Amino acid sequence: MIERVLASQGLPDVTDATDLQAVANKAKRDSRIDTANYDRYTVEQQIIKSCDQLGITTANRNISALSGTLLRNMNQHDRDEIARQLDANESASTLT
């Protein structure tokens, strides 16, 4: 069920962690990340700042590793959100 809903919403919308621009753009759409003034930063800096905000360790990690970890985190968040919505809908329908 989750897979069907994800697909219907075009998720995962980014699958290639080596596409740093796409990962940074996805981070800009993530409600958990404060992206104020992100346009002032390079794509690499945006990824690092996003990792920092999500509590992803950035020390001693290159941008490729950070991008991969950030993308997995955001894609998992998408899955978790869909699962929560499905649970809420199921709970609401059992109450009626």
Image (spheres, rainbow, N blue to C red):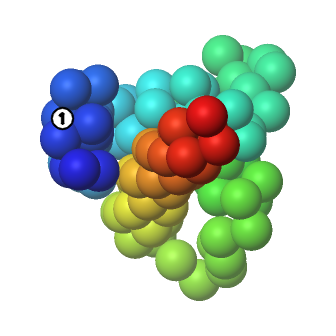
Q: What kind of element bears circle 1? A: helix
Using the image as rendered, state which of residue 82 and residue 77 is in the foreground. Answer: 82
Residue 5: horizontal and vertical position, in percent? 27, 36
Mark 1 surroundings: few (<14), some (14-19) or many (≥20) residues within 10 A: few
The quarter holding residue 39 reads top right
The quarter holding residue 59 reads bottom right
Residue 52: horizontal and vertical position, in percent? 74, 59
Q: Say above or below: 75 vs 24.
A: below
**Which residue type carries mark 1?**
Ala
Q: Say above or below: 90 vs 30.
A: below
Side of 21 where 57 appears, left or right:
right
Q: Say above or below: 42 vs 45.
A: above
Q: Give the residue at x 21% y 26%.
A: 8
Residue 78: horizontal and vertical position, in percent? 45, 46
Q: Which residue is mark 1?
A: 7
Residue farthest bottom in this picture? 60
Looking at the figure, which quarter contains the C terminus? top right
Using the image as rendered, state which of residue 81 and residue 54 is in the foreground. Answer: 81
Residue farthest front in this picture? 96
Side of 10 where 26 appears, left or right:
right
Residue 38: horizontal and vertical position, in percent? 70, 24
Side of 21 where 78 appears, left or right:
right
Q: Is any part of residue 19 visible from this angle?
A: no
Using the image as rendered, state which of residue 7 and residue 27 is in the foreground. Answer: 7
